[in-house]
Image (spheres, rainbow, N blue to C red):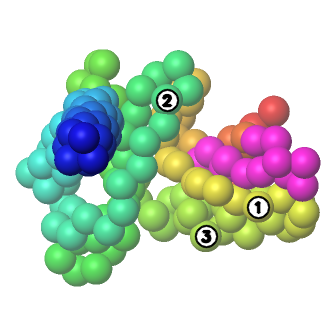
Amino acid sequence: MIEDDTRQTIKFVAWLIGIIIFLYAASVLIFYKASTPERNETKQLNQIALAKSPITKIEKNYHLDRGVNSYSLKGSSKNRQQYYFIYLPGSKKGYLLSAKKGVSEAKVRSSYQAQNPNNKITKVNLGWYNNRAVWEVTAKDPADHYQYQLYEFKNGNLLG
């Protein structure tokens, strides 16, 4: 009788462990599949930038969707000039921007932090908004609410 109880307990625990492993594997698969489109777009962006621009080394990727889905990257050329490349997959257009003719992510971060010293920046993305390149700063205020601000790439001015 005791052996039956032990056998049933072991069987129950084995089923429970099997269900937990299945649920874990299913959730990993779901998250992997959900992120596939963004990975594919980033891979396509990198291939286009390396093939069609002077960029030979990619340093950082960005993604912004403000009505227009845009994927961007920061890279450098053989002679170490810095560039940004923005690709709009919907219209299949790409824009090469010289870093010298715009403001950097670091400059945008410092501008935001100077105006909002109590907020914590969580992310900065380069993208396309209203037919121009913009930086979007995402931050959390002390009450843990998200704040978003857009800055023009060319001059660093805050957009309304």
Q: Between residues 107 and 19, which one lies in front from this camera angle?
A: 19
Q: What residue did someone put label 3 on?
A: 106
Frontmost of labels 2 and 1 is 1
| Residue 56 painted magenta | no
Quadrant hosting residue 78: bottom left
Please say whether residue 55 is visible from this viewpoint.
Answer: yes
Frontmost of labels 3 and 1 is 1
Q: Earlier in the sequence, mark 3 or mark 2?
A: 2
Circle 2: residue type = Asp
Please say whether residue 87 is visible from this viewpoint.
Answer: no
Q: How many marks?
A: 3
The secondary structure type at the circle numbered 1 is strand
* C-alpha gap between disc 3 and disc 2: 21 Å
Horizontal and vertical percent position of residue 92:
24, 25
Q: What range is drawn magenta here?
A: 135-147
Left or right position of 75 against 78: right
Q: What residue did someone put label 2 on?
A: 65
Circle 1: residue type = Lys
Horizontal and vertical percent position of residue 2:
27, 47
For the stretch drawn in magenta, what is the main secondary structure? strand
Q: Are marks 2 and 1 in contact (CB under 8 Å)?
A: no
The secondary structure type at the circle numbered 3 is helix
Q: Are marks 3 and 1 in contact (CB under 8 Å)?
A: no
Residue at the front extreme?
1
Residue 139 sits above or below residue 57 on the image: above
Q: For the N terminus, which image quadrant?
A: top left
Q: What residue did someone put label 1 on?
A: 120
